[in-house]
Image: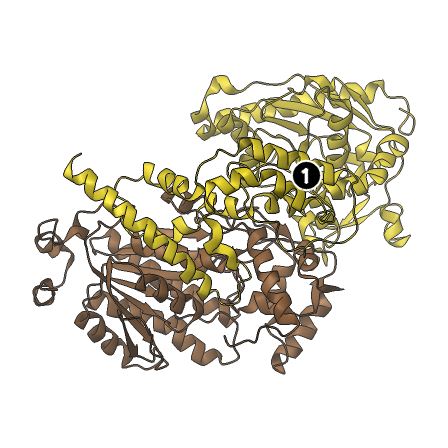
Amino acid sequence: MKREPQRRAKPRGPSDAAPLSAPPSEAPLATVARGDLVAAGSRRVVAVTGASSFLGSNLIALLEEDDSVSRIVAIDETSKTFPGPKTRSYEVDLTQPTSEARLAEILAAESAHTIVHLAFLASPSHGSAWVHELESVGTMRITVAAREARVRKFVLWSQTMLYGAEPTNPNFLTEKHPLRASRSEPFFADKLEAEAEVQRLYQQTQHGLDCVVTTLRTAPIVGPSVRNVITRYLARRVVATMMGFDPLVQFLHEVDAIAALKFAVDRDIAGTFNVVGDGILPLSTVLRVCGRVAVPIPHPVAERVNAALWLAQLADAPPEFLKYLRFLCVADGSKIAAAGFRPAYSTREALLDFVNAQRLRDVRLIEENVG
Amino acid sequence: MSKKKKKKQKGQEREIARTGEGRKRVTAKASASPRQGRAKAATPPARRSAGAPERRARTKPLPPRSPRPATVTIEKADAAATEPPFPPTLGPPEPRERDIEAEIRALEAQIDLLTPNRPPGSDALRKARGSDPVSGPTDTATELLSEAYVAQRWGKAALRSKFEPVDEFGYDKVYEERAKPLLDFLYESYFRVEVRDADRVPSEGRVILVANHAGTVPLDGPMLRMALQREHPKKRELRWLAEDFVFHMPFLGAWMNRIGAVRACQENAERLLQEDAAIAVFPEGAKGVGKLFRDRYRLQRFGRGGFIKLALRTGAPVVPVAIVGGEETNPLLFKVELFAKSLGLPFLPVTPTFPLLGPAGLLPAPTKWRIFVGEPLDLSEYGEGAAADELLVGRLSERVRATIQGMLDRAIGERRSVWFG
């Protein structure tokens, strides 16, 4: 805590990283090697954007239990307050131009060590201008604020969907593979821009900026309580499939997604990582396990009908998502496995867990309260 | 005991205590989770060991729920299953194999044998600690959901839920079994495939089969796979690499993928070879499929020698293969490229029967097939670094091409009839 004014008084720049590092007992972060556990005894402040989202609220609950986290700064556009004793909530609307300065102020005042950026939509939205402000521009504002407030770690949530479903994809996409998701769909375009923004921050760390930048690309998240475009698709009793196509799909359990974020907060792993459940399943099997009726539609027809329904705001997703029902988009999780994280649930187990909750939901034994 | 060690131990104890608590919390968080038995997981060891026969009795009356466990493995057999099997909800109802119940029972018995009488929770913790000297109190989530924990939680239930034996590249054994009558008919009666020297393919370890490609509708992959399954002394399972356009097409892509095709790219091939698989490549690629009838059995350029680079990098031997008969099944007269791109195809074929007879015109002609397997070529002497030597790659690629061309020429010379061989 007493380091805080000193840190702010110093001029910013890559060269003063070394003089800033106090003796290891007080400022262990400067001495910790990449990939190592952040030494016990260090009390960190973790900021979470998009705090009221599924991932955000669960991560905060997990951080509340962690003794090495002294305070949690929950940043969200709603004024929801979190019950934990360590959490402090701030209402910041990332779409506002003033949010940048306000964020920097909050982060500096709390002397945040880590920022976990989760303010992304889990489902496509019709309000594309607002989404662009929130996701693409919002990420820029957060990176600027993080740099301004000298945050030491930046964790970004991204998705393997951004690789794009293409017939020319290898069966297992590694982190080196280019992101080829359709840029004409704002859902992907804004997330791609957000990743590029964080990538720029990562480049700066290569040139002296003292910050660990981690991007976690999660496979489609399923589980008993998470709600996103995938679970919405699987929750329908009758689902459309593309005639003649049966791609392999991959899931990540919601608990694993939260655990992976926690892992990135705890350890200094710089770079981009795919976080995926082990194994794959054909889409036809997934639908059979869910007990859904699959209606095969020729894809040229489906694309036009879906486009019309999306315009009329009757469809869950724009036609760009239909590609994921035709071609595979499966990522390889061996890089984060090498760094020490192993998902507990395989694709199949994650799906089973989702299905068991979904069955109760189908017969209205569980009521939905998550957006 | 040093001060440091003591500190560490203390930290562990606190950690364990916290983990138990954390478990409850997370379950509560995943509000709708039906797996609420999580906190129960730390069953005392005495009950577990004594409970074995009782458990079997409990599981016995369950109906056969998992109808497709053709590749049942004991992945998570190292820990015990303390819970009764997962709620019977999964899988399609139609049973495909009769001895599933017996198979599962045998595997369950093995699990009981493998299970040591130790408290599983602490064991998992100890294991996690062993490799991690600085472990602080931050591992909660990963530890709580460690593999050992899940294995313990799921155990036999996991065995029973192996409802879809699709491997990581999409090959479905059950699906192939279903397609077997058709494939057998094609192999035995239609093309009357004969295989020479199938035993030249190494019995184990990674290997790359290189073959000529043709036929508009590429059936040479599945036929080569069947040839090895039937004629090879070790019945090797072959995966063949298919061009991109196959996966672009409805039905064909999904079907080929389920019976063993993999999209042709370096990443996939390398991954398969790392697993010591036998793979077949057709280096002519789409150019081979689009060979005109007058160019039959004249090998096209072998790509950029990707298969040689692959062999050099992975140390896999290269086996040249000549397939005679496959290039006459759909004699290609013209290629129309006008609308092909929009359909994701390299070209639209014009054969004597297609598009004249509609889709039926794509049926292959019943030619007589012969498959010749050449001597394996060991490239390991060049070393791994040789893959960067473009000149060497080109030379080796040309050598393999010449070998296959020679085999083809000899076989064509000996052949008396396209239909009867």
Instruction: Work out whether residue A263 can be spotted.
Output: no
Give the quarter of the image for residue B103: top right
Picture mark count = 1
**In the rendered image, which quarter contains the C terminus of chain B?**
top right
Q: Which residue is mark 1?
A: B104
Secondary-structure class at tag 1: helix
The chain whose colour is brown is A
Q: Relative to A113, say whether B312 is above or below.
A: above
Q: Name the residue nearer the viewer: A147 or B17.
A: B17
- Left or right of residue B263, residue B40 in this image: left
What residue is drawn where x is 20% and y is 59%?
A43
Is residue A151 or residue B420 the one in the foreground? A151
Q: Quadrant of the N terminus of chain B?
A: top left
Chain where mark 1 sits = B
Q: Residue at x 54, y 49 (%)?
A: A346
Residue A75 vs B111, above or below: the answer is below
Is residue B101 visible from the viewing direction of this image?
yes
User: Where residue B312 appears, x then y in whole percent?
Assistant: 50, 26
At label 1, which amino acid type do we have?
Ile
Please state which of residues A190 and B258 is positioned toward the viewer in this rendering: B258
In this figure, which colouring scheme has been used for the structure? Answer: by chain
Q: Position of residue B295 (x, y in %)?
A: 76, 34
Q: Which chain is yellow?
A: B
**Nearer-the-camera pick, B58 or A10:** B58
Is residue B118 rendered to the left or right of residue B234?
left
Q: Residue at x 33, y 74 (%)?
A: A83
- Residue B402 percent across, percent down from the top left: 65, 22
Q: Is residue A141 left or right of residue A109?
A: right
A155 vs A311: above or below? above
